[in-house]
Image (cartoon, rainbow, N blue to C red):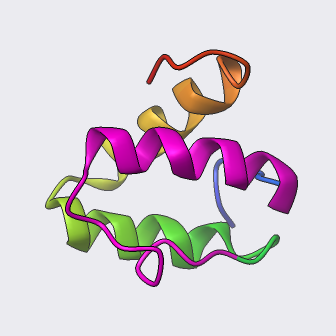
Amino acid sequence: MAEITISNKDWERVKIKVRRKYNHLTDEQLQYTAGKEDELINRLMGLINRDRKYVVFTLRKALVNIDTNIL
């Protein structure tokens, strides 16, 4: 089970932040369905070459600051 929960609505905002930070990622690579957080985390780990802890930290940070451009 994933350490975080992301709704489809929140993912749209988080995805923008992730794309700004990792501009080489495509929309196809950033596809997400609510409830499949583990799949997203594992995919991002490979795409940005970082460990799970870092990816979860980054996503949590984006969720906490959902209304800002901070990531």
- Establish if 44 lies above or below 54: below
Query: Percent position (x, y) of residue 8?
Result: 82, 62
**The one of 22 and 57 positioned closer to us in this rendering:** 22
Q: Residue furthest bottom?
A: 28
- Establish if 38 lies above or below 57: below
Q: Residue furthest left?
A: 49
Q: Quadrant of the C terminus?
A: top left
- Which region shows up in magenta? 8-32
15 part of magenta stretch = yes
Answer with left or right where residue 67 lies relative to residue 22.
right
**The one of 51 and 63 positioned closer to us in this rendering:** 63
Answer with left or right where residue 52 lies relative to residue 39.
left
- Establish if 27 lies above or below 69: below
Residue drawn at x 67%, y 31% is 63
Quadrant of the rendered structure where residue 44 is? bottom left
**The one of 15 and 40 positioned closer to us in this rendering:** 15
Residue drawn at x 81%, y 70% is 34
Query: Percent position (x, y) of residue 58?
Result: 43, 35
Q: Quadrant of the N terminus?
A: bottom right
Q: Is residue 53 visible?
A: no
Residue drawn at x 58%, y 71% is 38
Q: Is residue 22 visible?
A: yes
Query: Percent position (x, y) of residue 68?
Result: 63, 15
